[in-house]
Each structure stands twice: as C-alpha cells, then as structure tokens.
Image: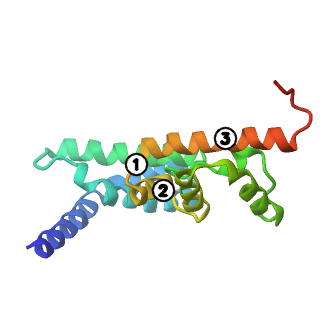
C-alpha cells in the first residue's frame, strides 16, 4: 500500500516542479542579477528545497497560494546563498579560530580539545566532522534540529574555553 502512495507523491512533486518551472527560473534569474552560474545554482538548490519541503505544502491550496509558497522557497534559497551559508551548517574550525583543514595539526588539535566532552557531545562532533549537516545529525541522534544547533553551540564554547586555557597565553585568566 505504501509503494503506490510514495510513487504518487513523486509524481505530484514532479508535476509541481513542471507547473512552476518558469516561475522558479524567472525568480532565480532575478535573484542572480544576471550571473548565469549563480542562476543555475539557485535553480538547482530551489528544486531540492521544494522536493524536501513538498509535504509541508497544504493539500488543496489554491494556485496562488502554491505560487506564493514556491516564490517563498526561492527567496529563502537566495537568502541563504547571499549570506554565504550552507543550509543547516556552521563551520566548527572557524568558531574556534583553528588552522585551516589543510594543516595536519588541526585534526589533532580538535581531538585534544574534544577530550573534555561527554560521550554524547563527542558523537555529535564526530558526525559533524564527518561532513553531516546539523539536520542530518539531528535525525541520526534522534533530536530536533534546534536542539542540535544548541548542542553544537555548547560544544564550540567548551572547546573554545579549553583552547584559550591551554593554547592562548595572552588571554586574561580568572
């Protein structure tokens, strides 16, 4: 019973994308400001976001509501792109003022700083360092994305304090 329902969902998503193809392309072209590369990237990211959020679209909504929702998703993708953020990601190294990833010592330093973390926090950090987004880590660990973001913040703060305590001798000590 589930397979035909899932198949019809895929067909519905494809129909939605086909119905609003021109709208998506025009909105992305407008947001890209004539930059062809950015335009193509925005179109692809918008299609992915529409695919991911399709189930949030109310069933039986009017064509105008559907168009407004599609445009909102386009704007949201552009907003994330403009701010230079990948959706649901915060680079840990940047928060800790650590060396670039090309530097062999950065992985060792992260390992040293992670020693004071709980097992739960270490698992979270391991998944993030493996390339998973906050949303993906939240699903894997069975938590809400907002809770995962808060956990990441706490981890970064703990590691920052450890870093400053052991490696930055110019910081005032309490």
User: Which residue is at the front of the view, 102 or 57?
Assistant: 102
Do the CB atoms of the residues marked 1 and 2 lie less than 8 Å apart?
A: yes
Between disc 3 and disc 1, whose residue precedes? 1
Sequence-earlier tag: 1 or 2:
2
Mark 3 lies on residue: 158
The residue positioned 54% from the left and 49% from the top of the image is 81
Q: How far apart in space, not on screen, are marks 2 and 3 (Cα)?
A: 36 Å
Q: Position of residue 33 (x, y in %)?
A: 55, 48
Q: Is residue 90 left or right of residue 77?
A: right
Which quarter of the figure is the N terminus placed in?
Answer: bottom left
Image: 169 above or below 99: above
Residue 143: % across, % down: 39, 49
Secondary structure category for the residue under label 3: helix
Front one among 132 and 167: 167
Write down the residue under mark 2. Answer: 42
User: From the viewer's perspective, is the residue at label 3 or at label 1 nearer?
Assistant: 3
C-alpha gap between disc 1 and disc 2:
8 Å
What residue would you read off at disc 1?
74
Q: Residue furthest right?
A: 170
Q: Residue at x 57, y 48 (%)?
A: 85
- In the image, residue 16 lies at what x, y percent? 23, 60
């Amino acid at each position: 019973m589930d397979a035909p329902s899932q198949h019809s969902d895929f067909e519905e998503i494809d129909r939605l994308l086909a119905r609003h193809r021109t709208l998506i392309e025009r909105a992305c072209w407008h947001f890209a400001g004539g930059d062809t590369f950015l335009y193509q990237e925005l179109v692809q990211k918008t299609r992915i976001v529409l695919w991911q959020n399709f189930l949030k679209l109310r069933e039986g909504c009017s064509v105008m509501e559907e168009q407004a929702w599609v445009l909102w998703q386009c704007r949201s993708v552009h907003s994330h792109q403009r701010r230079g953020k990948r959706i649901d990601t915060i680079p840990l190294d940047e928060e800790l003022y650590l060396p670039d990833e090309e530097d062999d010592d950065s992985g060792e330093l992260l390992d040293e700083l992670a020693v004071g973390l709980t097992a739960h926090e270490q698992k979270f950090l391991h998944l993030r360092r493996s390339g998973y987004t906050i949303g993906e880590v939240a699903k894997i660990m069975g938590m809400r994305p907002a809770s995962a973001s808060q956990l990441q913040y706490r981890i970064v703060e703990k590691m920052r304090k450890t870093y400053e305590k052991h490696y930055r001798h110019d910081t005032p000590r309490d």
